[in-house]
Image: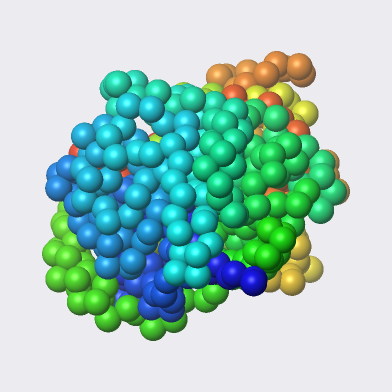
Amino acid sequence: MNRNLTICFTSDIHGYFSDMDYATGTPGTTGLSRCASSFPHDGNTLILDGGDILQGSPFAYWLSREPVEGAKVSAQVMNLAGYHFVTIGNHDFNFGRETLESYLSHLDARCVSANVEGVSGVERTAVVTLENGLRVGITGVTTHFVNLWEKPENLVGIKVHEAFPAAAAALEELKQAGADITVCIYHGGFENDLTTGELLSDTGENQAYRICRELDFDILLTGHQHQAKAGLQLFGTYACQSPDRCRQYVRMDAEVSADGDVTAHSRLVEPGKPDERLAAFLAPLDAQNAVFLDQPLGELDIPLLPGDHMEMAENGSLIANFFNQVQLEASGADLSVTSLANVVKGFDRQVTIRDVVATYAFPNTLQTLQVDRRVLKAGLERCAEYFELDESGRLQVGQSFLKPIVQHYNFDYMSGLEVTMDVRRPVGDRVTSMVYEGKELEEGRTLTLCMNNYRATGTGGYPFYAKCRLVKDQPTEISQMIIEYIDRHKHVVVDKRKWLHVIY
């Protein structure tokens, strides 16, 4: 007799529990509440999560002011949504062991993690029998890059072992326990191109492709990279990845035949109406959080108000300068680039958390690359394409930034390097000067350049960045870095230097 298993899988929720749009203070269309409303609750369904619960949203930031108590609230939300098993994400260590253990101790769900040692409430593996008699073996693993990213004081008494050997050992345990079907929840992503198989990163941060290729889990549920992937079958393993913030969730339907053969299919499910119980629980908390989000976080020495996109690109944007000074302090890099959204809110002198999430609108993290003059010139030449001259010789936005879609966010503002562009020259040969620390940057000299992870992949017309050596990877969202920067400094003096000079 064939037996079925349904899995509903989320990952990287990052504290986006309700459907609140924190930039506007009005309901949106995503969030756990809107996904949980369509979770089936029956004896043959498992609701699973891949970690990164405790950090990431303005709501989570509010809870983190009292992290141990805030973790209880996060656990209550997960309980109302009906989760059965979770694993730990790298950001779940951000507030230390006591907070993580508070979260796990108040969860109804069981936590499985084969490579995390020293945290109460964590099991290496588990086998659960469904209503139809199917024995489902479950384990979890977390990217061991936690050891590189996390503050040492938050890992006191905790060991995070390498992910792949821990997954391999856990799989053998599940087979020995007689599981009919094996499931691994991996807080990590894919290191290879899923179409060509090309190796994209050999750092070891992400090992999902290797797990599929070298181990024989029936199902691999991944996260961490914040990408939506479903319907995958790699080397006999059915795999998927849930996007962040509950923008969607993954539903996987599996069948085990009488002979033990496993077949499965996964698909992405769109959020629906808010779950009534979750909405009722979260509404008063969202109201309290709204008061906190609109309180002044700190003060700038001048207001940072947006101008026309062309005006900002030509004359520089102090908003971009501010973002860059945050990134430079956080990364320790020599240079920084940032970009602005198509619609930019800006800041008055008194800055609130809501101002930050409305003005830095991307869910990006920070990466630092090793670059030289050749790479920097290539990046700046791409930026120079933003400028065109109309018939009267006035600057206008280049067509490649307007069609097929408007993409002002692909123009980068640089700090740390004084650049001159001559727009009268041909595209690809417009950058005439790059001055670093008072003198022209020499050929062959290497510097470090920090940027958002979106740009570091080469997206937006910057493919050369993807070939640069990654010096530092900081998985905290940049909007969170901005909030913490203002909260730490309180009175911020904004960099007012004009880094770009455009000749036309």
Residue under the point 54% across and 74% down: 269
- Say if 253 sits above or below 195 in the image: below
> Where in the figure is residue 439, as x and y percent of width and height?
63, 18
Pick whichever, 302 or 296, lies toward us: 296
Pick whichever, 252 or 475, lies toward us: 252
Q: Is residue 294 left or right of residue 498?
A: left
- Say if 71 sits above or below 376 in the image: below
Pick whichever, 474 or 300, lies toward us: 474
Q: Quadrant of the N terminus?
A: bottom right
Q: Is residue 402 left or right of residue 43?
A: right
> Where in the figure is residue 480, as x and y percent of width and height?
36, 46
Residue under the point 46% across and 50% down: 127
Q: Is residue 414 left or right of residue 29?
A: right
> Where in the figure is residue 491, as x and y percent of width and height?
22, 38
> Where in the figure is residue 468, as x and y percent of width and height?
71, 30
From where the camera sits, is residue 289 visible? yes
Q: How many marks?
A: 0
- Say if 343 sits above or below 48 in the image: below
From where the camera sits, is residue 187 visible? no
Residue 180, quarter of the rendered image: bottom right
Residue under the point 81% across and 53% down: 195
Indicate the colouring scheme.
Answer: rainbow
Residue 488, quarter of the rendered image: top left
Pick whichever, 251 or 342, lies toward us: 251
Residue under the point 69% across and 44% down: 216
- Say if 446 sits above or below 22 in the image: above
